[in-house]
Amino acid sequence: MHFGEIEISILNAGTFYLDGGAMFGVVPKTLWERKTPADSRNRIRLGMNALLLRVAGKTVVVETGAGGKWDAKNRDIYGLAEADPLPEALAHAGVRPSDVDIVINTHLHFDHAGGNTRIENGRTVPAFPNARYVVQRSELEHAQQPSERDRASYFPENFAPITEAEQWWLVDGEAEILPGVSVHPIPGHNLQIQGVQICGGGKSAFFLADLIPTRHHVPLPWIMAYDLYPMITLETKRKWIARVVREGGAILFGHDPDMPAAQLRERDGKIVVEPVDGNQ
């Protein structure tokens, strides 16, 4: 996809499996299973979609998936591949890890920041040695001291090596990262999560991460049980869905394994999801 001078590629950083009930909160299984069937362990298949942006002479990666630093037990729990798929996806696009200038993490949960680092000679090091990693300052602070409610989502090996290497670019609230690329708070999943907006050529794209993780989460009440602040999620979704519809932009889903990009249209008072060809 091209947005003026900005080129966007959607990369497959792998798939994983989470409990379907947790993914849809108070929505009954009889409803959500019509959209995405569960396996024998009540898990549904989810994508880990990353973005590759080429803008202003810079190479930017948005999200890094779950990475490859997993033992056999956790690979089985989450249905993860043994190797990290993201480096291969980048290589297919002609990008080496050393070519990446900026990595944007929407937040530091393992399925969004696991590929921030890799193991080299027995040490965990930044996977992108020349990149600055962008995250909300408050998110890094929270990741370092998470609550009992969300401790299982944060793994220090995904972010501590970035601190040691002094590669963080910490932002506070809305910030322009590069011309046409900005981050915006989208609280609800937690208070520190950020979305990414890409604007160029009179068009916009919105990567809203775990605010609207799949196309099935577009309806306002379809909110994950993982969200720490579901009522804040509700109002944040209301705000951003209205904006996406108003601006006619593309919405890029972080966890939809089958439809990573779409447009939202309002028809007869309902929001309709229409797929977008990510290669255009």
Image (tube, rainbow, N blue to C red):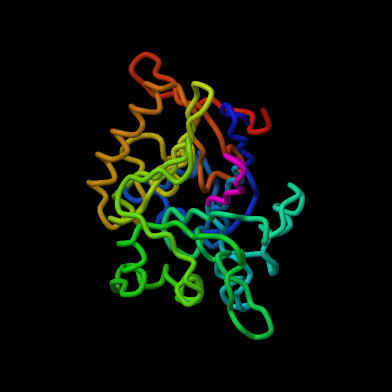
Q: Position of residue 272 (x, y in %)?
A: 45, 23
Residue at image position (77%, 50%) is 92
Q: Position of residue 278 (x, y in %)?
A: 63, 33
Residue at image position (59%, 30%) is 5
259 to the left or right of 108: right
Farthest residue toward the front? Answer: 57
Q: Which residues are magenta?
A: 54-62
Vertically, is 185 above or below 88?
A: above
Farthest residue toward the top? Answer: 268
54 to the left or right of 91: left
Vertically, is 279 above or below 169?
A: above
Residue at image position (33%, 53%) is 189
Q: Position of residue 52 (x, y in %)?
A: 61, 46
Q: Front-most of 45 and 168?
A: 168
Residue 239 in which image quadrant? top left
- Please check the rendered image and state whether residue 60 is part of the magenta-colored stretch, yes or no: yes
272 to the left or right of 69: left
Q: Front-most of 247 and 175?
A: 175
Vertically, is 35 above or below 4?
A: below
Residue 144 in which image quadrant? bottom left
Dominant secondary structure (helix, strand or loop) of the stretch shown in magenta: strand
Q: Position of residue 67 (x, y in %)?
A: 60, 66
Q: Quadrant of the C terminus?
A: top right
